[in-house]
Amino acid sequence: MASSTFLLSPLTLSHNKKPLLHSSFLLSSNKNLNLLLPKRLIRKSNELRTLTVAKSNGSDSADAPDRLISALCYFYPFFDGVQYGKYVITQFYPVQALIQPLFPAIRVFKSFPFNGFLVFLTLYFVVVRNQNFSRYVRFNTMQAIVLDVLLIFPDLLERTFNPRSGFGLELLMSLDSTVFLFLLVSLIYGSSSCLFGQIPRLPIVADAADRQVL
């Protein structure tokens, strides 16, 4: 708005009368048009204008604090499921070097057995269900929570089938490695997208997060 005002001001100064006549004609024509239009259409147009302004200034904003909070949320499922990377980390040094700076934070997260559950309750009830946070933050937080909830399935498989050797062990290693790599990619993609103000949509979990965030 400031730039448009700046660009219009020289025209107004150089042609002082014509812009005034033009603006007065527009105002009178708008008034006459409002008189001709049904009240229902005028009311709907005003409501649409109000909704557009509210959306541009409202819950879908992604300012710097929103981006930072959303980016940090994706560390939660990664920390909670980092144990699935025990085969990948030991076999591939680049992966170990990539996540090595996170080892102190992972130790703190794993130091108390109920930390994961407490973080889950905090994120869900304090962030997702809190309308004071923008929808951008609540969606990304819910997406991280859904991703963490899905870790129940590989955990149940490990507890039910715990092979020690043979084809079963190879299948378990492949499953664990796939889960870990998916968590790592989700962390990198989700956090980097949030830092740039974009909305990451992870496969499988994005639609579920949309349904939970009002």
Image (cartoon, rainbow, N blue to C red):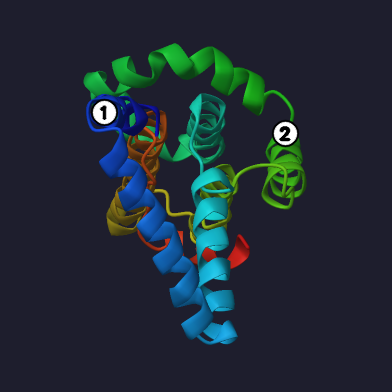
Asked whether, in this view, residue 130 is left or right of residue 201, the answer is right
> On screen, 98 above or below 175?
above
Look at the image and tell me whether residue 2 can be seen: yes
Image coords of residue 149 (percent x, y): 58, 55
Q: Residue at x 44, y 40 (%)?
A: 84
Judging depth in this view, the residue of 182 and 132 nearest the camera is 132
According to the picture, the residue beneath numbered tag 1 turns out to be 7
Judging depth in this view, the residue of 19 and 104 nearest the camera is 19
Q: Residue at x 23, y 33 (%)?
A: 15
> On screen, 33 above or below 188?
below
User: Mark 1 or mark 2, which is nearer to you?
Assistant: 1
Q: Amino acid at mark 1?
A: Leu
Image coords of residue 47 (percent x, y): 58, 69
Asked whether, in this view, residue 51 is left or right of residue 21, the answer is right
Q: Which mark is residue 115?
A: 2
- Secondary structure of the residue carrying tag 1 is helix
Q: Residue at x 50, y 75 (%)?
A: 34
Q: Residues within 10 Å of mark 2 (few under 14, many from 20)?
A: some
Look at the image and tell me whether residue 160 can be seen: no
